[in-house]
Image (tube, grey):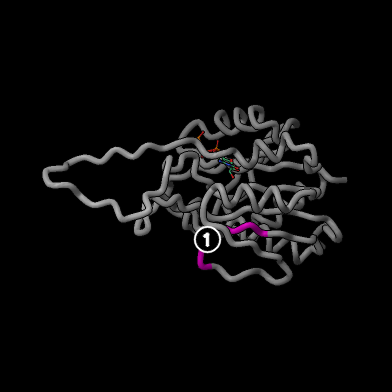
């Protein structure tokens, strides 16, 4: 029997964000949203009261989950903060770190002879760090870190810098794991140490992660 989460309010972010350049183009990333949706589905199945803030993905809303659809990092920031207070925040979304300084109102046209285009990007607000520093801070703030190298080192840095309770690191750029895949492997790091989960289907990993979260809430 899996641990119950009856009555626990959990906010999960999932998917990519799209940062508009002009009415026809955007900057995005390769997040499928599958990990965040699997966590939301499993948490709801265990009785949690789940809000899923979803970036632009074509995935079905899991049973019993309240979904809020967003497009940009700024919209995701507003939707997540509006969903507080909660007991647990799980930031599984791949939020854009930078966004165009301004979205052009008209389609950007090539000029004769132009062979480069410079886009000015500004940093987005860090939703995870703001939730962790919020007056209504959830009891547990859980982040994700997608890394190509030095996975544990970079993830531990993010855990400390953003003042998180737990971070789930995964290696990207490896076939069969991470972005766009149905399977994943996570290295879950907290103040007490590290736990390797998987490789396993994302729905199974979601259950293992929620077991750890339930332990930390006890
Ligand atoms: N995150 C967030 N808001 C942002 C950027 C990231 O909430 N504006 C969250 C993500 O949801 C994820 C974690 O922060 O839980 C990822 O951390 P980040 O430092 O952004 O990782 P990377 O995008 O991999 O950035 P870096 O270039 O530092 O590796």
| Residue 54 visible in rendering | yes
> What residue span does the magenta drawing correspond to?
52-58
**Quarter of the image where ligand 1 sits:** top right
- Among all residues in the image, which is located at the extreme left? 113
Residue 57 is inside the magenta segment: yes
| x and y, in percent, of residue 212 in the image | 76, 47
- Front-lying residue, 208 or 144: 144
The residue that appears at 33% across and 55% down in the rendered structure is 106
Question: Residue 142: horizontal and vertical position, in percent?
Answer: 69, 43
Residue placed most toward the observer, 125 or 65? 125
Q: Residue furthest front?
A: 105
> Can you identify the residue that label 1 sits on?
182
* Quadrant the C terminus occupies: top right
Taking the spot 49% from the left edge, 36% from the top edge, the residue there is: 123
Identified at 52% across, 52% down, the residue is: 72
Q: Nearer the viewer, residue 31 or 68?
A: 68
As drawn, is 92 to the left or to the right of 171?
right
- On whether ligand 1 comes within 8 Å of the CB at mark 1, the answer is no
Q: Position of residue 51 (x, y in %)?
A: 71, 59
Can residue 177 be seen by looking at this rendering? no
Q: Is residue 1 left or right of residue 186?
A: right
């Amino acid at each position: 029997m899996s641990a119950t989460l009856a009555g626990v309010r959990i906010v999960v972010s999932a998917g990519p964000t799209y940062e508009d350049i002009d009415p026809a183009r955007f900057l995005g990333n390769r997040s499928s949203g599958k990990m965040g949706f699997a966590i939301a589905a499993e948490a709801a199945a265990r009785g949690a009261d789940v809000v899923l803030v979803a970036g632009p993905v074509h995935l079905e809303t899991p049973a019993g989950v309240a979904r809020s659809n967003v497009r940009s990092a700024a919209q995701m920031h507003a939707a997540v903060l509006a969903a507080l207070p909660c007991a647990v925040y799980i930031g599984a979304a791949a939020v854009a770190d930078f966004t165009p300084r301004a979205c052009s109102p008209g389609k950007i046209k090539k000029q004769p002879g132009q062979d480069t285009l410079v886009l000015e990007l500004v940093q987005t607000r860090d939703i995870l760090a703001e939730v962790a520093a919020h007056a209504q801070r959830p009891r547990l703030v859980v982040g994700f870190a997608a890394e190509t190298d030095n996975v544990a080192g970079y993830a531990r840095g993010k855990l400390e810098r953003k003042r998180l309770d737990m971070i789930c690191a995964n290696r990207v750029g490896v076939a069969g794991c991470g972005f766009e895949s149905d399977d994943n492997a996570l290295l879950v790091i907290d103040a007490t140490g590290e736990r390797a989960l998987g490789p396993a289907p994302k729905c199974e990993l979601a259950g293992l992660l929620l077991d750890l979260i339930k332990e930390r809430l006890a």
